[in-house]
Amino acid sequence: MQFTIHADGGSRGNPGPAGAGAMIRDALGNSVASVSQFLGTRTNNFAEYEAVILAFTAIAKLVGEGEVGATDVAVKMDSELVVKQMKGIYKVKHPTMKEQYARLVQATAPFKSVSFTHVPREENSDADALANEAMDRGA
């Protein structure tokens, strides 16, 4: 199986009220799940990581434990920081971000393959809308 995650996180203020959003699509581009969660007072980078973690959790539930190891996932997001940290280009230095990084590594580990790609904000509008909806609900 193959899925694409479009993920985004944001905060109004940094830190401030934060939200995470992700749209999950199958190999044909059909939307199969979405995530939109208010995170309380967090930084935008925390929210970016959380959006991807929540999306991987959703995919794992969607496919079931037995199929996770046969599932390929492409992550597309407009956070250059998260993409480059997950590719090993940037180091993760902040203690809270180290925890988020470790949680994301753990969430991705059971999958067959995972890739991270930076996309322009315009190509991530669904995830951005879901993150903003989460912030609106929590504010």
Image (spheres, rainbow, N blue to C red):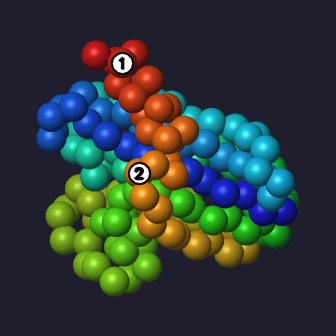
Image quarter in which the N terminus is found: bottom right
Q: Residue at x 53, y 60 (%)?
A: 76
Identify the mark at residue 4; answer none if there is no mark.
none
Q: Position of residue 97 (x, y in %)?
A: 27, 60
From where the camera sits, is residue 52 visible?
A: no
Asked whether, in this view, residue 11 is left or right of residue 119, the answer is: left
Type of residue at label 2?
Arg
From where the camera sits, is residue 75 visible?
A: yes
Mark 2 surroundings: few (<14), some (14-19) or many (≥20) residues within 10 A = few
Identify the mark at residue 121; answer none if there is no mark.
2
Q: Residue at x 43, y 34 (%)?
A: 131
Image quarter in which the C terminus is found: top left
- Mark 1 = which residue? 136
The local secondary structure at tag 1 comes to helix
Residue 58 or 77: which is nearer the viewer?
Answer: 77
Q: Position of residue 77 (x, y in %)?
A: 46, 57
Q: Nearer the viewer, mark 2 or mark 1?
A: 2
Quadrant housing residue 23: top right
Q: Is residue 2 above or below residue 6?
A: below
Tally of numbered tags:
2
The local secondary structure at tag 2 comes to helix
Residue 131 or 93: which is nearer the viewer?
Answer: 131
Q: Is residue 113 above or below residue 58?
A: below
Q: Position of residue 96 (x, y in %)?
A: 23, 56
Q: Residue at x 42, y 25 (%)?
A: 134
Quadrant housing residue 112: bottom right
Mark 1 surroundings: few (<14), some (14-19) or many (≥20) residues within 10 A = few
Q: Residue at x 38, y 82 (%)?
A: 88
Q: CA distance from mark 2 to mark 1?
A: 20 Å
Type of residue at label 1?
Asp
Q: Position of residue 99 (x, y in %)?
A: 32, 60
Residue 48 or 111: which is nearer the viewer?
Answer: 48
